[in-house]
């Protein structure tokens, strides 16, 4: 269950004038092991008792991650497809992104790994397996 759904149930029970302990007991009875922790239930019950209306998390401060933007992912993908033997350090120099960001894009977003000094998708489709451009190592 999504955390906002749990919060909606907590808000409903708090509006029925139930205590945090009663809310916790009801959630545990219904959801069992998948229920929220006691501290989380108490914290949200207290928030709703204070008059909070929103079920969403508050905005957090800090820098947003801009290195894994769709533009950067496309740029890295194009560079890798042009030269399958390109290294992470070469991509770092070409794009201006950090080594860690390049690594995250290649492995986490594009799902590629280095095989025989060449970047290839981890999950090859039947069409990819039939391509004659793959040469032995």
Image (spheres, rainbow, N blue to C red):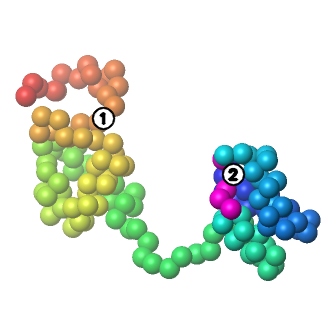
Closer to us: 75 or 85: 85
Does the magenta-highlighted stretch encompass residue 99? Answer: no
Crowdedness near tag 2: few (<14), some (14–19) or many (≥20) residues, C-alpha within 10 Å: some
Closer to us: 122 or 16: 16
Q: How many marks?
A: 2
Residue at left offset 21%, top offset 61%: 99
Residues under labels 1 and 2: Cα distance? 36 Å
- Relative to 28, is 15 above or below? below
Give whichever of discs 1 and 2 has the lower sequence position.
2
Percent of width and height locating residue 98: 23, 65
- Relative to 41, is 32 above or below? above
Residue at left offset 17%, top offset 35%: 115
Examine the residues drawn in magenta and state their main secondary structure. loop
Q: Which numbered marker is on residue 90?
A: none
Residue 94 seen in the current view? no
Residue 28 seen in the current view? yes
Q: Quadrant of residue 132?
A: top left
Element type where label 2 sits in the image: loop
Element type where label 1 sits in the image: loop
Q: Which numbered marker is on residue 35?
A: 2
Of tags 1 and 2, the one toward the viewer is: 2
Q: Is residue 135 left or right of residue 29?
A: left
Percent of width and height locating residue 22: 84, 61
Which residue is the site of mark 1?
Answer: 122
Percent of width and height locating residue 117: 11, 39
Q: Is residue 41 left or right of residue 82?
A: right
**What is the magenta range?**
34-38
Q: Quadrant of residue 75?
A: bottom left
Closer to us: 39 or 136: 39
Q: Is residue 51 left or right of residue 76?
A: right
């Amino acid at each position: 269950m999504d955390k906002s759904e749990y919060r909606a149930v907590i808000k409903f029970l708090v509006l029925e004038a139930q205590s945090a302990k009663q809310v916790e007991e009801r959630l545990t009875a219904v959801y069992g092991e998948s229920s929220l922790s006691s501290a989380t239930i108490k914290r949200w019950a207290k928030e709703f008792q204070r008059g909070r209306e929103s079920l969403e998390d508050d905005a957090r401060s800090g820098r947003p991650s801009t290195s894994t933007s769709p533009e950067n992912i496309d740029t890295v993908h194009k560079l890798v497809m042009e030269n399958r033997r390109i290294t992470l350090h070469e991509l770092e120099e070409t794009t201006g992104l950090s080594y860690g960001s390049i690594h995250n894009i290649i492995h986490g977003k594009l799902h590629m790994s280095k095989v025989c000094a060449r970047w290839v998708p981890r999950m090859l489709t039947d069409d990819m397996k039939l391509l004659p451009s793959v040469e032995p190592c």
